[in-house]
Amino acid sequence: MHEKERHRIILSAVQDRPVVTVAEMLELTGASEATIRRDVAALHLQKKLRRVRGGAESISPPQFSGLAGRPFSVNETRALSQKRAIARAAVALCQDGDSIIINGGTTTFQMVHPLVNRRMQVFTNSFPIAEHLLKHSKNTVLLSGGVVYREQNIVLSPFENDVTRNFYARRMFMGAQGLGPIGLMEADPLLIQTESKLIGQADELVVMVDSSKFEARSSLVLCPLERITTVITDEGVTDRTLRMLESAGVTVVVAGESGSRRQDDTSVG
């Protein structure tokens, strides 16, 4: 990653929360600790942020703090071919007339392209997903209400009496910060709160994660593996991970560029 891109990501992060730690900047950029410390020092001298012990903070903090995790714009091009294959496999599970929930994220966003030929009821908290489907498809689109988080391009509500409780879905499709033996993990408490409500409105939970997410971890667990109906991932998934998911009763779909297969070798797309 070039210096200008790292600086853009670091400045975006410090505008999004009170203090960004060096560890968080390492996760966001993939750079070394020495490189991050040089970047922070340079931006401090340019008066674009304030260097603090263990991290950095904004010189003009925002009124509302943002969400933990990488911005949508940073994640959008990561593992793009895998995300597209995963998205095609996800849409292959749907039928015209279905009611589905699509949680915001860069992997779920890739569902919009194969969805243009469908006619379904789609509930989403993602502005990019809603906008694309409204412009390019005949799906009925419902958008949740709440606070707009610009960096992640999603709408989240901390309130119990929102429109979420009035929508029933056959399936919910979502990504994740990480997925391991303890369950599905997210990076922010507000995500846990709002996504828990969405999960409760769906019969089946379909988790869409590229194989790198099986190595990622977070301190916040959204739900146990047993709540997940299906995991769609890419061909980089390990045998150990497959055994972990199957022992929890989770159906696994491995998506590749030439098509997808369940672990029982039945073709699904």
Image: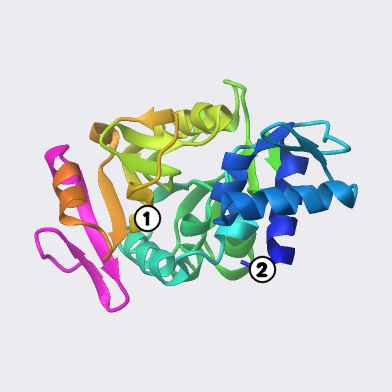
Please name the residue that numbered disc 1 is placed on.
212
Residue 255 lies in magenta, yes or no? yes
* Number of disc labels: 2
- Quadrant of the image containing the N terminus: bottom right
* Of 33 and 164, the residue lying toward us: 33
- Quadrant in the picture for residue 82: bottom left
Of residues 189 and 226, the one drawn nearer to the viewer in this rendering: 189
Q: List x then y, in percent, for residue 163.
A: 58, 32
Question: From which residue to which does the magenta span run?
Answer: 245-269
| Left-right relation of 180 to 156 | left
Q: Is residue 257 above or below residue 25?
A: below
Q: Residue at x 51, y 36 (%)?
A: 187
Is disc 1 placed on a helix, strand or loop? helix
The three-letter code of the residue at mark 1 reads Ser
Q: Is residue 74 above or below residue 80?
A: above
Q: Residue furthest left?
A: 264
Label annotation for residue 17: none
Give the residue pinned by disc 2: 2
| Depth order, front residue of 250/200 | 250
Instruction: Give the residue drawn at x 71%, y 65%.
Output: 3
Q: Position of residue 188 (x, y in %)?
A: 55, 32
Q: Visible in this render: residue 95?
A: no
Residue 79 x %, y %: 45, 66
